[in-house]
Image (cartoon, rainbow, N blue to C red):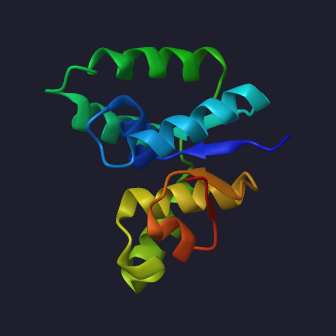
Amino acid sequence: MTAVFLDTVGIIAVWDTSDQWHAPAAAAYELLKQQGRQLLATTPVLLECGNAAARRPYRSRVKVLRQALLSEQLLIEPTPDDWAAAWDAFDRGEANQAGIVDHLSFAVMRRLEISEAFTNDQHFRAAGFTTLF
């Protein structure tokens, strides 16, 4: 079974019950867990989650996610080639002007041959990936 890339939008939507995407994200996340799908993320995505959760009641969930990803070796450190590809795509304005962290996610996903992202971020669709909610 193929891996799924965890994006900040999806993670925060699961954690934040007031998020407009909480219900579909939570349902999609439960299905992924039931299917036993491997869920991975990059260190920059984890940093974005930490920033978003810093002053929120779910702040402690960042540490739990980090520990889980580390213990399963699913926290991916982007390579220098990933960074170069991301900055090149960012400079060209690809994927509907996606941000640099998204471009870095795309580079890692391509390198690891991951086609699905746990997000509903339109930038992932514009970059050719399947979003899961």
Residue plotted at (67% across, 34% down): 31
Q: Nearer the viewer, residue 55 or 107?
A: 55
Q: Is residue 43 above or below residue 72?
A: below
Residue extending farthest front: 23
Relative to 96, 26 lies left or right: right
The answer to whether residue 76 of the structure is visible from this angle is no
Task: Please name the residue shown 60% across and 46% down the image.
Answer: 5
Q: Would you say residue 102 is visible in this rendering?
A: yes
Q: Is residue 91 left or right of residue 70?
A: left
**Residue that protrudes farthest toward the right in the picture:** 1
Residue 112's place in the image compared with 90, above or below, is: above
Q: Disc count in the image?
A: 0
Q: Who's the residue at 72% across and 54% down the image?
A: 114
Q: Residue furthest bottom?
A: 92
Q: Is residue 58 left or right of residue 27?
A: left
Q: Nearer the viewer, residue 127 or 33?
A: 33
Q: Residue at position x 26%, y 37% from top?
A: 18
Residue 30 percent coordinates (x, y) = 61, 30
Q: x and y percent of residue 63 in the render? A: 38, 16
Query: Dividing the picture into quarters, in which one does residue 10 lie?
Result: top left
Residue 11 location (% of width, % of height): 43, 37
Residue 113 quadrant: bottom right
Q: Toward the viewer: 118 or 87?
A: 118
On the image, the x and y values in percent for residue 84 come to 50, 65
Q: Nearer the viewer, residue 6 or 20?
A: 20
Q: Residue furthest left?
A: 55
Q: Which quadrant, please, contains the N terminus?
A: top right
